[in-house]
Amino acid sequence: MRPTLTHLALHVPDLEPCVSFYSRFCGMRVIHERAGKGSRIVWMAEPGKEHQFIFVIMPGGADRQLAADDYSHFGFALENREQVDAIAELARQEGCLIWAPRDEPYPVGYYCGVRDPAGNYVEFSYGQPLGPGSEAMPIP
């Protein structure tokens, strides 16, 4: 038996700001919506990955108040450092930047961190052994 990770389900305090966040910051799009227990449930995916991995976003959750030293996060790879800087600038303008862009030794790479409207941390990186540019890097 070899399970495959297919989705992540999130209860969020307010559905619409989270759908908007994952659309604008992560390039995800709504691929399915349905009613669920008196509310709306939304499935989001990266274009072209709709059959590989999705976020299921549901209202009714509490705002996550992560500690300053809590690095729990969702990770999104970008194609270059300039895209990391662009996401960080957008987050700075919107008041949700939590980790300014920084360079860490391999395998961490160049990254920034953003807080979504539900309090989840989202990392945007370049140079990790996953995502764009990883083909040239050995996985430790």
Image (tube, rainbow, N blue to C red):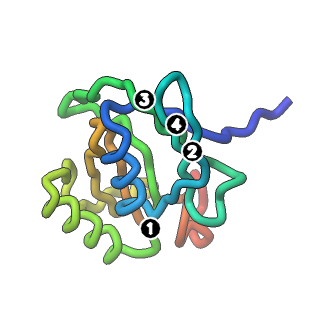
Residue mark closest to the camera, 2 vs 3: 2
Q: Which residue is mark 3?
A: 11
Disc 3 from disc 4: Cα separation: 10 Å
Residue mark closest to the camera, 2 vs 1: 2
Residue 83 picture quarter:
bottom left
Q: Which residue is mark 4?
A: 41
Residue mark closest to the camera, 3 vs 4: 4
Disc 1 from disc 4: Cα separation: 27 Å
Residue mark closest to the camera, 3 vs 1: 3
Q: Which residue is mark 2?
A: 33
Q: Are marks 2 and 1 in contact (CB under 8 Å)?
A: no
Q: Which residue is mark 1?
A: 78
Q: Secondary structure at mark 1?
A: loop
Q: Quadrant of the N terminus?
A: top right
Disc 2 from disc 1: Cα separation: 27 Å
Residue at 32% x, 77% y: name it. Answer: 82
Residue 53 spot, x, y in % from top left: 63, 48
Residue at 71% x, 53% y: name it. Answer: 51
Disc 2 from disc 3: Cα separation: 15 Å
Q: Amino acid at mark 3?
A: His
Which mark sits nearer the N-terminus, 3 or 1? 3
Residue 68 spot, x, y in % from top left: 18, 33
Q: How would you rate the neighbour count of disc 4 (Cα within 10 Å): few for under 14, some for 14-19, many for 20 or more?
A: some
Q: Secondary structure at mark 4?
A: strand
Q: Secondary structure at mark 2?
A: strand
Q: Are marks 3 and 1 in contact (CB under 8 Å)?
A: no
